[in-house]
Amino acid sequence: AAAPPPSPDALGPDPPAAPEAAMERVPLAAGEALFSGPRPGAALYLVLEGLLHAVEPAADGNEAVVRVVAPGEALDEMQLLAGSAGPVVVRAARDSVAGRVPGEAIDRLAAAHPEIADALRRLHLRQLLCRLHTVFGAFDRRLLDDVEATADWVHLPPGRVLFVQDPPAERAY
């Protein structure tokens, strides 16, 4: 059996000289927001210690946990563009430390190292999966791995039909 691909959530410490050199440590107290809503200066965040929750505020004041992000996993603000009804807020579920790598540093690394560009693409696809939290519940690494292992992404050009529901399809879309 082939070895599993490297985790899309772990871009360093080592994929060539990795983002660690450009990383700023961001300590967070339990309940403190890492980010909420779009901001200038996009960045990639690596969870170094603790636990983060990406939550979607509801109109009634409650929050739905979209994703649980543990040490060794990454996220960025791409999830804000993934069709949510409102902004996703990422906050520390307990005292935590994140590493922030500025977007321009990630762009340079991705341009120079195809494996980093591929890891970012996979990270963005996994973050898009998290938008299905109303169907699957909060996503964590294990659920993301399971869905990724059993599903195929289908890229459709504009105007193409994904499927027609007659006769009944053999797959779920």
Image (cartoon, grey):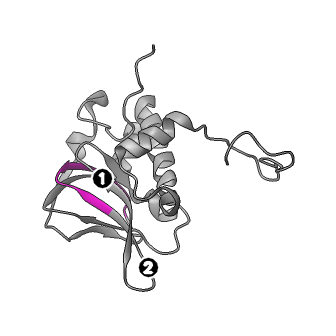
- Residue 52 forms part of the magenta stretch: yes
Nearer-the-camera pick, 47 or 24: 47
Residue 148 at x, y = what percent? Answer: 50, 39
Would you call the spot at circle 1 few (<14 residues within 10 Å), some (14-19), or many (20 or more)? many
| Residue at (67% x, 46% y) in the render | 172
Is tag 1's residue or tag 2's residue first in the polypeptide sequence? 2
Nearer-the-camera pick, 83 or 115: 83
Q: Is residue 154 left or right of residue 55?
A: right
The amino acid beneath tag 1 is Val
Q: Is residue 105 left or right of residue 145?
A: left
* Label 2 sits on residue: 58
Would you call the spot at circle 2 few (<14 residues within 10 Å), some (14-19), or many (20 or more)? few
| Residue at (13% x, 67% y) in the render | 29
Q: CA distance from mark 1 to mark 2?
A: 20 Å
Residue 69 at x, y = what percent? Answer: 30, 52
| Residue at (37% x, 67% y) in the render | 55
Residue lying farthest to the top in this orientation:
1
- Residue 102 forms part of the magenta stretch: no
The amino acid beneath tag 2 is Ala
Name the dominant secondary structure of the magenta segment.
Answer: strand
Query: Residues in magenta?
Result: 41-53
The secondary element bearing badge 2 is classed as loop
Nearer-the-camera pick, 42 or 155: 155
Q: Where 41 sits versus 105, above or below?
A: below
